[in-house]
Structures are given as structure tokens and as C-alpha cells.
Image: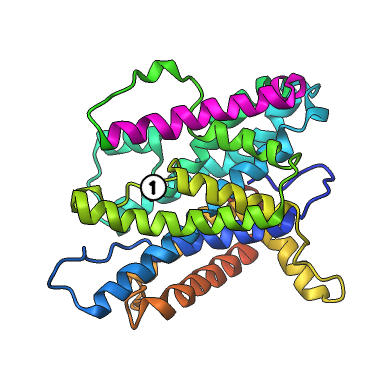
Amino acid sequence: MDSKSATVNFPVDTIRFIAIFLIIFLHSSGYPYKFLTPETTVIDIVNWFTLNFYDTIGMFGLPLFVMLTGALLLNPVKSDEPLRVFYKKRFNRIGLPFVFWTIIYFIWTFAVLDWPFTTFNVLQGLISGSYYHLWYLYVLMGLYAVTPVLRVLVKNLTRNLFTYLLILWFTGTVVTPTIHTFTDFNFNPVVFVIFDWVGYYLLGVYLINSNIRRFVAYTVMILGLIGTIMSDWIITAFLGAQHTGICHNYMSPTIILGSAALFFILVTGKSIIIKSHVKLDRFVQWVSQNTLPIYLLHMLVLITLTNGVFGVYLNTLTFSPVLDTPLFAAIVFAISSTAVYILKKMPYISRLIG
């Protein structure tokens, strides 16, 4: 989610804009709806599939950010950047915001949401994030830590070896856990050493140098979307409610394929910035430059509305999820963006929020 990048030939601002809205869309639709049982009504079924559909679309957001970051930071031309220079840039970008928002969300959870103020909760918050969406900052730290090594690797890998590396990642991250989930077989995890977000990170720079027919990319994206929704329904129906959401995680095959296809479509597509519309141009660019503070702030806005902290109560089931989710996401996005715009006008606060 680093907004300071070198000149590139794909629409960075567009991708960031879409990604941040998808994340807010995900969190806006992410409140669980009751599990489908024989007693549920047709409306319940429609609501379940609606929220499932919206949730799946939203899950493409964070992988877009990680792939975009990989496409920008793993560029082979940057492999000679001194470590000191690289880490200074990264610290300036997320160091102070990490400390600031960790404190803010500690205050929020303990003082407003009345979570127990215990030594364990404080230490656990420092280790994994004082609020659940802050885990992304920890992912960034890990990716930044290995970036100098990955830059050299990417620079020297042939296309075939790069493809092989991604196959190893997909196998270790997706195939073997899936086999373990649905069978009694259990693979030793030490066989595969490349896991989780490193694969998305590498996939970003891989895809910007790929030649794939756009029809194929659109097909894969749609299949990833439908596959996630239907897999969740079928698995839940046959294996029970305890397996709900197996496909709704960032390392599921359908989410990986769907989000990768969407990223390719976006990097090979046109920018949504229209030069003849100056205001739209400026708005998209401003959001792109401020995705980090918008991301870090939006959960405060969302939880405030869903819990009615200030007397205003909204969620995705106020009327109907079909309309409520897009509307709720738009409201959270608008309030978060406005708040960030105001905070950015304050000299000292501006640097703290990201």
C-alpha cells in the first residue's frame, strides 16, 4: 500500500482506488448471517448468497494491494538500492503510523468497546495487532524484510524458474492444505518453504510481465468468484456449519486465481482517470496517495456505525443486504476519506496517520 513509486506503465492509482474500496466493501459485508437450515426462508437464502457474493468480491482487495506492492518494489531495476535507503523509506512510510494506530485502537478497544484491560491482551495486541485489520501492517513488515533478497532473486530468475517457484508456492499454500482438509492425509509442512503472502508479492511482478489473453483472465476471475461462493455452499451443506468459510480465506485456490486474474486485467487495462475530468482525476489520485490512512481509519468508522456509538446505527441488514452493503460501504468510504482529508490538513497529525 505504498503510494510512493517509480514511474510505471500501468494504472497504479486505479488499482489502489479499486483495492481500498473492495477492502471496505469486504468489511462492510463481513458480518455473519445465520447459517442456512431447513427452516430458513427464501429471503434468508437470498440474503446468505448476497452477502457471500459481496464478501467474495471484497476479498480480492487485499491481494490486489500485495501484488501491486510486489510489482512496484520487486522491479529488477531496484535491486541495487542500498539496504539503508530502502528501509529508511519503508520506516518513514509505516513506522509512525504503526505506533500511532496501535495506540488509537488500544484506547478504542479498552475504553469504548470495553475489552478487558489485561497484560495478556496488551501483549497479544502488540504481537498481532491491537485491532484485527492491523495485521496487514505485520504482513508488510515481513514482506519488506525479505524484499532486498527477493529483488536479487527476481532479477536473476529465468521465466521458467519463476513459474516453477510460483507453482511450489501454490502447491504448499493451497494444494496440500486442501488435501488435508478433505482427507485423512497430512503433508509435512516443512517440505514447502514458500508460503502465504510472499507468493502474492512475487505474483505481482510476475503478472506485469505476463502475456495472457484478456478473455482468459476474465474467465478465470469469474470462475474464481463463482467457485468461492458455490464451494462454500456445497462444503457447508455436506460437511456442516463448522466448515463454513473454508474457501473464504486469502489462500484458497479460488481467491488466489480470481484476485490474480483481476490484477492482470487491471494492470493491462486503462486508467479510470479521465484527463478531461479534472475533479475525478484529482480524487482518484488523492485516494491512491492516502490508501494507508483510509485503510487504518475505516474500521473505527465502521464499528462506530454498526455499534451505534454516537446514536447512529447502520449495518448491512438494516433493510436488505442487496442494497445495504454497497450503500454502507460507500458511507464508510466517504466518511473515512473525509476524515483523512481533514486530518491531513493538520501538520503533526498528517505524518502520524500515514
5 lies above or below 22: above
The prevailing secondary structure element of the residues shown in magenta is helix
Asked if residue 329 lies left or right of residue 291, the reply is left
61 lies above or below 191: below
Furthest-right residue in view?
276
Residue in view at x 50 percent, y 62 percent: 24
Alpha-carbon neighbours of circle 1 within 10 Å: few (<14), some, or many (≥20)?
few
| Residue 119 percent across, percent down from the top left | 26, 34
| Residue 305 percent across, percent down from the top left | 38, 71
Looking at the rendered structure, the kind of residue marked 1 is Tyr
Provide the residue designation for mark 1: 132
Residue 289 shows in the view:
no
Per the rendered image, the range of residues in magenta is: 153-181
**Residue 135 drawn in magenta:** no
Camera-side residue: 190 or 123?
Answer: 190
| Residue 190 percent across, percent down from the top left | 40, 16
Asked if residue 316 lies left or right of residue 347, the reply is left
**Residue 162 drawn in magenta:** yes
Label 1 sits on a secondary structure element that is: helix
73 lies above or below 330: above
